[in-house]
Image (spheres, grey):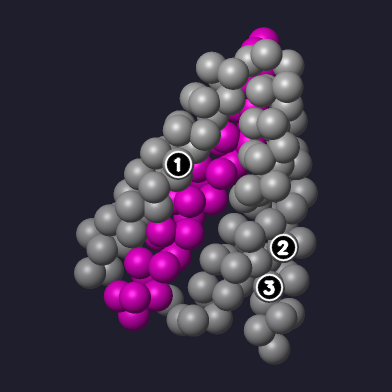
Amino acid sequence: MNWLLVVAGAVVGAPLRYLTDRAVQARHDSVFPWGTFAVNAVGCMVLGLVTGAVAAGAASPQVQVLLGTGLCGALTTYSTFSYETLRLVETGAGRYALANVVGSVVVGLAAVYAGAGLASAFWG
């Protein structure tokens, strides 16, 4: 049963990632991968919120499987982040690559922490 929840979340998350990435990147005239950066940050926030809601008893473990594993798993993308960072290095944009790595880790951690904090404020 859980695998169906993962699939259902991924069916929404994967196209949402693609469409969001394209929309965000189209608005920036930069080699920096803003689209991937944005979907990863949003995914971290959602995962923190969902995990916090489950921990507070405001959501079921099935919601975590659906939204956390399925939706966020398909929405966020470590492989694309890694590939885009490598491409930045290969094209001589080392500073952008470093900013992508540091920014992604810092913003991702801050977003998951903020999401968990919001869940705690609402349901804790």
Instruction: Judge whether residue 27 can be spotted in this image.
Output: no
Residue 6 got which mark? 3
Q: Residues within 10 Å of mark 3 (few under 14, many from 20)?
A: many
Could you give the CA–CA distance between mark 1 and mark 3, rounded to whole angstroms? 25 Å
Describe residue 100's horizontal placement relative to residue 124 as left or right.
Answer: right
Q: Which residue is most to the bottom?
A: 1
SS for dot 3: helix
The residue under label 2 is 10
Residue 105 got which mark? 1
Q: Residues within 10 Å of mark 1 (few under 14, many from 20)?
A: some
SS for dot 1: helix
Residue displayed at 56% across by 35% down: 38
Q: Position of residue 110 (x, y in %)?
A: 35, 44
Residue displayed at 39% across by 75% down: 54
Could you give the CA–CA distance between mark 2 and mark 1, rounded to whole angstroms? 23 Å
Describe residue 46's horizontal placement relative to residue 16 as left or right.
Answer: left
* Residue 1 picture quarter: bottom right
* Residue 95 picture quarter: top right
Residue 45 got which mark? none
Q: Is residue 45 magenta?
A: yes
What amino acid type is highlighted by mark number 1? Val
> In the rendered structure, which segment of residues is drawn in magenta?
29-58
Q: Position of residue 77 (x, y in %)?
A: 66, 48
What amino acid type is highlighted by mark number 2? Ala
What amino acid type is highlighted by mark number 3? Val
Q: Position of residue 16 (x, y in %)?
A: 70, 47
Instruction: Please state which of the two labelled residues, at mark 2 or mark 1, is closer to the viewer.
Output: 1
- Determine contact: label 3, label 2, CB under 8 Å: yes
Q: Which residue is most to the top?
A: 29
Q: Main secondary structure of the magenta part?
A: helix
